[in-house]
Amino acid sequence: MLIAIFSNYLLLMVILGYSFLLKKISLNNNIKIENIDILYGLSLIIFISLFFNFFFPLIHLKPIVIIFGLLLFTHAAYKKLFKINFILYFIIIFFTTFTAFYSNMNVDSPMYHLQIVKWLSLHKISFGLTNLEIRLGFNSSWHSLLALLDLSIYKSSAKYYISAIILSSLIYETIKSKIKLNYSDFFLYLTISFLIFFSFLHPLNNGIILNHLGNPERDIVGMLFFFLIVFFFLKTLENTKDNKNYINLLIISLFLCITSRLMMLPMIILLIIILLKNRTYKVINFTTILLFVTSILWILRSFFLSGCLFFPFYQTC
């Protein structure tokens, strides 16, 4: 368990390192990295994973990505760019990883989630992989991230526990000190409170929701990214000063949610509403260009694996 917690501490710093890099390039000013900016790092790592997996097995790239992320984090920390209480953050990660460590394996993970991550790690993108097993055609950006950040120490593998970092980020955002509470903060507080309370009352171990934490699957992260979509939608309605950053984070949340769980596509209507209300927002910027290119890579990967642009919808095959 202690190795799993240490791995999540280390990977949090890696992700925040890439968050610093992408936010610095995107906003191009005197930035400060906050907890929720972790989404920048996730999107950049997924881009790296998808791009290089066309040419290499991700296992060869993993050490480089992790070491470079730690160097970026060290640089940002030295410049005092983080507005994060790391003591509180690490305490939260301790408990969420503890929960993930003692969760049960669900049915889907040994059936095909683990196999997908293994193929991404040990092979470059394989044409027609669904001919071997139909479920291997499921194309989730979350699996790409897991394969690239699957830090293995002794017999512990980080791919089972990385989703606990995302839950920790939402919990941290909920309980951190705020000058003023808005509707978006109440939404996140009520959502996380219900999630924890339901899991506490449920008779099955950690409950049917948090039991997914200890699995390399995409359902729980899709749910957490869904919460963030609504959270940033409300934030952009409430704020005027930092709207560019919040709209960027809304777009990243949509990208992560939809590419993890394609059924979330209708949520894009919230982005359309925000763009209509914020006509001064420049849609073409570094973040949106990066996400557009990453989306193209994600669609191409699906086509190479299954012959479908959006597997398993046969109309796109």
Image (cartoon, rainbow, N blue to C red):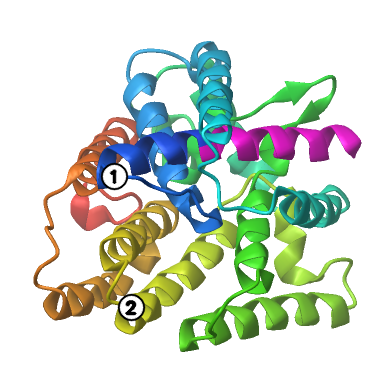
Q: Is residue 129 left or right of residue 227?
A: left
Indicate the position of residue 209 as horizontal and vertical percent values.
Answer: 70, 69
Q: Is residue 6 magenta?
A: yes
Query: SS for tag 2?
Result: loop
In terms of secondary structure, where does tag 1 sit?
A: loop
- Where residue 167 is drawn, which disc sits there? none
Along the line of sight, the residue nearer the viewer: 72 or 15: 72
Which residue is painted at 85% across and 32% down in the image?
Answer: 3
Q: Which residues are magenta?
A: 1-16
In terms of sequence position, does the residue under pointer 2 or pointer 1 come before the other?
A: 1
Question: Residue 5, position in %: x, y?
Answer: 81, 40
Q: In the rendering, which numbered label is found on residue 29?
A: 1
Q: Amino acid at mark 1?
A: Asn
In the rendered image, residue 280, in percent from the top left (x then y), is placed at 10, 68
Q: CA distance from mark 2 to mark 1?
A: 19 Å
Image quarter of residue 258: bottom left
Label annotation for residue 239: 2
Q: Quadrant of residue 153?
A: top right
The answer to whether residue 238 shows anywhere in this view is yes
Q: Image point 41% across, 46% down: which residue?
A: 40
Image spot of residue 74 (x, y percent): 58, 27
Q: Is residue 10 above or below residue 227?
A: above
Taking 35 as reference, is 297 above or below it? above
Relative to 236, is 18 above or below? above
Judge left or right: residue 253 versus residue 183. left
| x 66%, y 68%: residue | 176
Residue 122 colored magenta? Answer: no
Q: Is residue 219 left or right of residue 126?
A: right
| Residue 225 appears left or right of 310 | right
